[in-house]
Image (cartoon, helix red, strand yellow):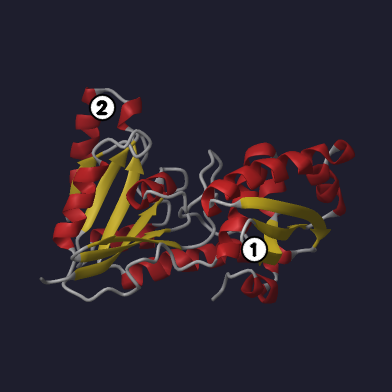
Amino acid sequence: MKHKAGFVNIIGNPNVGKSTLMNAFVGEKLSIITSKAQTTRHRILGIVNGDDFQILFSDTPGIIKPAYELQSSMMDFVKSAFEDADILIYMVEIGEKELKDEAFFNKITNSKIPVLLLLNKIDKSSQEEVEEKILYWKEKVPNAEIFIISALENFNVESVFNRIVELLPESPPFYPKDQLTDKPERFFINEAIREKILLHYKKEIPYAVEVETEEFIESDKIIRIRSVIMVERETQKGIIIGHKGAALKRVGTEARKDLEKFFNKKIHLELYVKVNKNWRNDKRQLRRFGYNE
């Protein structure tokens, strides 16, 4: 039996549903999802295996014009996704125009590899608008195959998946067949905590936060985790902790519940908050947190 394998990289503007699609393909919550832009900061690999295929899906940060070093690093992850893709998924939603970054958009329209343009969130639109948008995107990206989907409702996702399997190049698997992702456990702990911060705090707070897990001790019945939430200023530390620690406690409780589902084990989670000034513009610190690699 011939075996197929390849990298399928998901590109698009912020908040178009890339992470929802990735999780739908993989069947696990690998990428965190919130309504805020720039939720995804890293390039996250999700591996889907069949008897005769292996698909390496990459969720990437939404394309933006960088304002500080962290965002530049996020766009480097997007650049790398163009470089190693066997198939590109360009995801758009009803009502939006082409990518904010013209150079990235030109890479898609001039791509020599298959491009699948997914028109997402069609559940929020009329039939007439959908037909109009299909014509618009056919003109804008003539080299793409267009699919209408709702990643959230799982509508037409299977058709896209089947087409991806057809397009995969012949290759042996890149990873062991029982592997789900290339990220370590601590990465998913950090992301689960960061998701709750994105959900519960406003304005600049979620974007000034990085999470680092300092301790991960697993026994038969329980995993003991100690994680540090880093902020840039003392005032942000106070907001994260909240009155009598209530806000931090809510983040910890909700993250622990998600992690218990993810690891299928009881979790003891300790959270601390630390000020780490200007970490978003510090290349050395960003490398430590897995950026600029």
Location of residue 69 by image quarter = bottom right
In the rendered structure, find residue 287 and report the number of the disc placed on it. Answer: none
Q: What residue lies at 23% left-to-right and 76% top-to-bottom?
A: 172
- Judged from the image, the secondary structure of the residue bearing numbered disc 1 is loop
* Residue lying farthest to the right in this orientation: 244
Label 1: which residue? 219
Is 196 on the left or on the right of 21, as rendered? right
Q: Is residue 80 visible?
A: yes
Left or right of residue 170, residue 57 in this image: right
Check disc 2 and give the amino acid type: Glu
Mark 1: amino acid:
Ser
Residue 203 in sight in this render: no
**Picture coordinates of residue 41 (x, y %)?**
54, 58
Quadrant in the picture for residue 107: bottom left
The residue positioned farthest toward the left in the image shown:
1
Image coordinates of residue 126 in percent, x first then y, are: 27, 22
Q: Residue at x 40, y 48 (%)?
A: 23
Dot 1 alpha-carbon crowd within 10 angstroms: few under 14, some 14 to 19, many 20 or more: few
- Depth check, front residue: 154 or 61: 154
Q: Is residue 252 above or below residue 143?
A: above
Image side of residue 248 versus residue 161, left or right: right
- C-alpha separation, residue under disc 1 versus residue under disc 2: 54 Å
Residue 170, position as x, y percentages in the image: 16, 72
Residue beneath the point at 37% across and 48% down: 27
Q: Mark 2 Cα within 10 Å, few/some/many (few <14, many 20+)?
A: few
Instruction: Report which residue position mark 2 lands on.
Output: 129
Q: Is residue 279 above or below residue 98?
A: below
Q: Which element carries disc 2, helix, strand or loop?
A: helix
Viewport quadrant of the C terminus: bottom right
231 shown above or below 160: below
Q: How many marks?
A: 2
